[in-house]
Image (cartoon, rainbow, N blue to C red):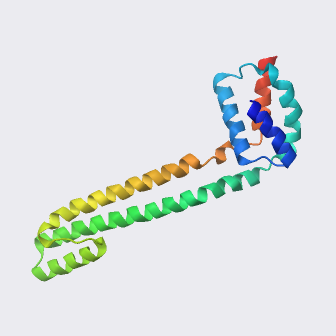
Amino acid sequence: MKRCISDIHNAVARGRISLEEQIRAYDLLDRYLEMGAGDPENYCDEYLAAKDALAAAYDEQSLKNEAEERLVPLKESMNEARFAAASAASLHEFAKEVFEIWQTSGVFARRRALKELRERAGFRLESHRIGNYVAKTFDLMNEAQARFARAQQAVFSADVKYKIQPDTYARIYDLLCKTKN
């Protein structure tokens, strides 16, 4: 609570609320809603004096822009991981096709398919172990999908736009005063 009051004073002095201050206030409100405000006796009057001046310092669009800017590198990583996962899935599907060609076609079709698979795979493939390539590309596909899932989770975890709400500080004050009275 002391940190939140300090954030209010700093925001009023600067003329704007930072994203970090808004997130701290949201988390404080969330804790209060979950557990109760505790002992607000020391904070209600001080909070009241600061919170009214805070309304002029609140710029929702600026906060949302800052939150979105933080996501840009994570989204880029996620898109790269998505592309790698799609590429690995495509390679796996092609390896299955080559395996089918290897079992059913003639020597020239088999060599042509194996050559193309070798080019697309980017690693050496032995012709007498063609069945292992399906398994190897399946493992590569699973690893790429796992990297994509981790990158996607990082984006979801870092997205704090839902914490940007104009009435956060007023709701904290209401909780403090309700508990006080």
Image-quadrant location for residue 86:
bottom left
- 144 with respect to 28 (left or right): left
- 115 with respect to 53 (left or right): left
In the rendering, at what x and y percent does residue 36 appear?
68, 22
In the rendering, at what x and y percent does residue 160 appear?
63, 46
Location of the C terminus by quadrant is top right
Depth order, front residue of 25/92:
25
The residue positioned farthest toward the top in the image shown: 181
The residue depicted at 86 percent of the width and 30 percent of the height is 48
- 154 with respect to 170 (left or right): left
Image-quadrant location for residue 20:
top right
Q: Where is 19 relative to 91, above or below?
A: above
The residue positioned farthest toward the bottom in the image shown: 108
The residue depicted at 89 percent of the width and 32 percent of the height is 49
- Tag count in the figure? 0
In the rendering, at what x and y percent does residue 109 appear?
16, 80
The residue depicted at 68 percent of the width and 27 percent of the height is 32
In the rendering, at what x and y percent does residue 165 appear?
73, 42
The residue depicted at 22 percent of the width and 66 percent of the height is 96
Location of the N terminus by quadrant is top right
